[in-house]
């Protein structure tokens, strides 16, 4: 029995500490997905809680052949989509400020001496925030959560090839927007 399966069984057996551990393990994933799709910070917090309630309520239905992270990510994605459908809210991105430059889909060689690292990271986060969904979600899952195309596909119900295509297009859009906005020729390469 894997550690993941033992954790699930402990939760199903009523171990509240085990459920707290599950929340701790997967809260970053859930926050990334919800934060990429939902504009209102109040709604974000409520939705993250709703996701973990749904996880708890449906854990006995979890197919143990799948990865738990993919299953939880799918619940977060669908919960956010359902919320958007109800509220007709705008899609939004909120890349965390502690995100390191090496995880961004832009090469660090693009930075020159005139632009401070923090300033450029903020500008990139701002432009990522303006990308249409699902581009912003896919960038976050791939670059920040380091998920594979297949795992992202399981969460978003897209084939791996579509995920790869969307990721390529998202990077291209980001480069074009940054090059145009900041008039940096190097960003187009």
Image (cartoon, rainbow, N blue to C red):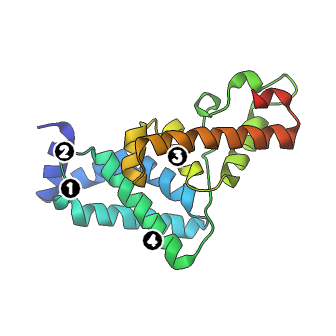
Task: Name the residue nearer the viewer: 141 or 15.
Answer: 141
| Circle number at residue 138 | 3
Q: Position of residue 78 (x, y in %)?
A: 41, 63
Give the CA separation, mark 4 to mark 2.
Answer: 26 Å
Q: Which residue is mark 1?
A: 62
What residue would you read off at disc 4? 82
Give me the C-alpha separation between circle 4 and circle 1: 20 Å
Q: Count of labels shown?
A: 4
What is the C-alpha distance between the residues marked 1 and 2?
9 Å
Report the Cα–Cα distance between label 3 and label 1. Answer: 24 Å
Q: Nearer the viewer, residue 158 or 174?
A: 158
Mark with earlier residue (4, 1): 1
User: Is the Cβ of the residue at disc 3 closer than 8 Å to that at disc 2?
Assistant: no
Residue receiving disc 2: 65
Element on which disc 4 rests: helix
Please give the name of the residue rendered at 67% of the width and 47% of the height, measured from the top-left corner: 128
**For the point 43% across and 59% down, which residue is it?**
77
Q: Determine the CA span between mark 3 and mark 4.
A: 18 Å
Quarter containing the C terminus: top right
From this view, report whether residue 67 is shown above or below residue 76: above
- Judge by depth and name the residue closer to the eye, 42 or 104: 104
Sequence order check, earlier mark of 4 and 2: 2
Disc sitting over residue 26 in the figure: none
């Amino acid at each position: 029995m894997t550690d993941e399966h033992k954790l699930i069984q402990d939760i199903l057996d009523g171990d509240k500490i085990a459920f707290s551990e599950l929340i701790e393990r997967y809260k970053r994933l859930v926050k990334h997905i919800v934060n990429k799709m939902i504009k209102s910070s109040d709604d974000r917090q409520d939705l993250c809680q709703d996701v973990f309630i749904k996880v708890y309520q449906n854990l006995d239905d979890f197919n143990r052949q799948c990865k738990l992270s993919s299953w939880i990510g799918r619940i977060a994605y669908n919960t956010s989509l359902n919320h958007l459908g109800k509220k007709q809210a705008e899609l939004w991105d909120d890349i965390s400020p502690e995100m390191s430059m090496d995880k961004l889909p832009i090469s660090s060689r693009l930075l020159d001496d005139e632009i401070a690292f923090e300033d450029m990271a903020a500008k990139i986060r701002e432009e990522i925030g303006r990308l249409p969904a699902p581009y912003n979600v896919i960038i976050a899952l791939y670059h920040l959560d380091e998920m594979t195309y297949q795992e992202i596909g399981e969460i978003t119900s897209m084939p791996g090839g579509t995920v790869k295509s969307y990721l390529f297009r998202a990077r291209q859009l980001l480069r074009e927007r940054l090059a145009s906005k900041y008039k940096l020729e190097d960003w187009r390469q």
